[in-house]
Amino acid sequence: MVVYEKPEHAMSILTPDLVSRYSVEGPRYTSYPTALRLEPITDPVVWREVLLSANQIRKPVSVYVHIPFCKSLCWYCGCHKIITKDPADADHYLDLLEAELDLVAPLLHERNQLKQIHLGGGTPNFLRVDQLYRLTGKLRQRFRWSDAPEFSVEIDPRLFTREQAQGLADIGVNRVSIGVQDLDTRVQVGIHRLQPSWMIAQSFEFLREVGIHAINVDLVYGLPHQSVESMASTMDRMTELRPSRFAVFHYAHLPSRFPSQRLIQTEALPGPETKTLILMDIIRRLDAAGYVHIGMDHFALPDDALAIAARDGTLHRNFQGYTTQSGLDLYGFGVSSISHVDGNLIQNGKDIDPYEAAVRQGRLPWAKAYAATTEDRLRRDVIMGIMCQGHVDWEQLSRTHQIDAERHLVKERLRLIPLMADGLVDVHDHSLDVTGLGRFFLRNIAMVFDAHLEPSRESRFCRTW
């Protein structure tokens, strides 16, 4: 296990020049390879056999369900969503989800335990309470739930009610993520998402009333009209509410990929230096408030399960970000969702009409996939070791993959030399260790070992800073 320096020590040597040199486009490594490697499926039967083969082994699983509906369009958002105010659309969509679950469930080992459930979107609390009951009932019918699965849900505080809070508690939800982004009114107008601070506080109150105390807050820096001062005010109010975790995401302005972002005034976006100052101030404030820097952009209270996992070396990453649940195959349901099974990636179609046509006809709605190679599996272990433990043991890697890892990755090890000179990593005879300073550059370090990165004229990733 790696023991890191305190954030304030690392930030004392975090200079604007260093940040500028490492501010490049790069993956967030919620998987390796990333979802950009997905290719159109030509033979669905092959992928059905992939799942059947993977599930010959009794193994716990994770489920992600994508709820794409939003009542209004947030201009900054890069998620797959459908804008509607009609709750009947959700009933129709639940019909399709149930049909998809019926198609996939027979491919799983009957003794696989469901240990993690996540409802994402879109806006999961677009669903009424009775619709939440219906969805959870189907999941219980089709999966063998463990005794105490982690059950998390993303919510939009603008739609959240006391009745919904009770409904979440009743179906077994034990963690909730609240999309805050920024509390500054000017910023909220600039991204078309108005939600006053009392609304956030009220959501905390509703959740705690029903016994849900594991609350995550999502913030975004780099939004239009943001400044160090405006975000400092947001941080003061949010740390007073004392959520369990913070995720502080760098806004990726990719209008060529996400048309809604074209509505944002480009000239209102803060520059690189301002964004750096905003993030550094956020980190200082979270450290002063007692939050542990888990890695990259995640922070947690010391007694939170994520902080404990970071300390004992069991931290993991999947498409929802950092998680305590390691070794789980992930099954995604709904439009655009991605499954990650035995290292392979399989994605449902992003458009609702083809998705519906497939499940109505009894076909799995898969549109794209990627089969992991032996080389991918080796590099995935290196990258996840960097991202999650800040440590790679070359000897252990060699034993696991039956290869001389140090020799096999000698070119990459040489590419680490400039990072060593900048104090981001320490490379020893048989291991690589990320330094306290390097924790702010995990993506840059991991990119050294990414065999799939290639130059592109089009922006495909958010910047690392």
Image (cartoon, rainbow, N blue to C red):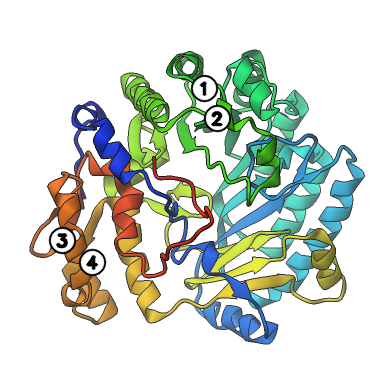
| Residue 446, image x, y percentages | 32, 57
Q: For mark 2, what is the residue?
A: 223
Q: CA distance from mark 4 to mark 2?
A: 35 Å
Amino acid under label 1? Gln
| Residues at discs 2 and 1 in contact (Cβ within 8 Å) | yes
Residue lying at 82% horizontally and 70% vertically, measured from the top left? 359
CA separation, marks 4 and 3?
13 Å
Q: Residue at x 17, y 44 (%)?
A: 422
- From what the image shows, is residue 335 above or below residue 282? below
Residue picked out by circle 4: 412
Picture disc at residue 431: 3
Tag in front: 3 or 1: 1
- Considering only order in the chain, which callout, 2 or 4, is on the residue closer to the N terminus? 2
On the image, the x and y values in percent for residue 323 come to: 45, 49
Q: Quadrant of residue 145?
A: bottom right
Q: CA distance from mark 3 to mark 1?
A: 41 Å
Q: Nearer the viewer, mark 4 or mark 3?
A: 4
Question: Could you tell me if the residues under marks 4 and 3 are in contact, i.e. CB atoms within 8 Å?
Answer: no
Q: Residue 295 falls in which quadrant of the image? A: top left
On the question of residue 363 being in view, the answer is yes
Q: Residue at x 48, y 73 (%)?
A: 342
Q: Which residue is mark 1?
A: 226
Q: Do callouts 3 and 2 mark residues in contact (Cβ within 8 Å)?
A: no
Question: In the figure, is residue 121 to the left or right of 227?
Answer: right
The location of residue 197, given as percent across then percent down, is: 62, 15
Say few, some or many: other residues with alpha carbon within 10 Å of mark 2 (under 14 / 14 to 19 / 20 or more). Answer: many
Residue 430 to residue 322: above or below: below
Query: How far apart are labels 2 and 1 at the CA level?
Result: 6 Å
Q: Amino acid at mark 3?
A: Ser
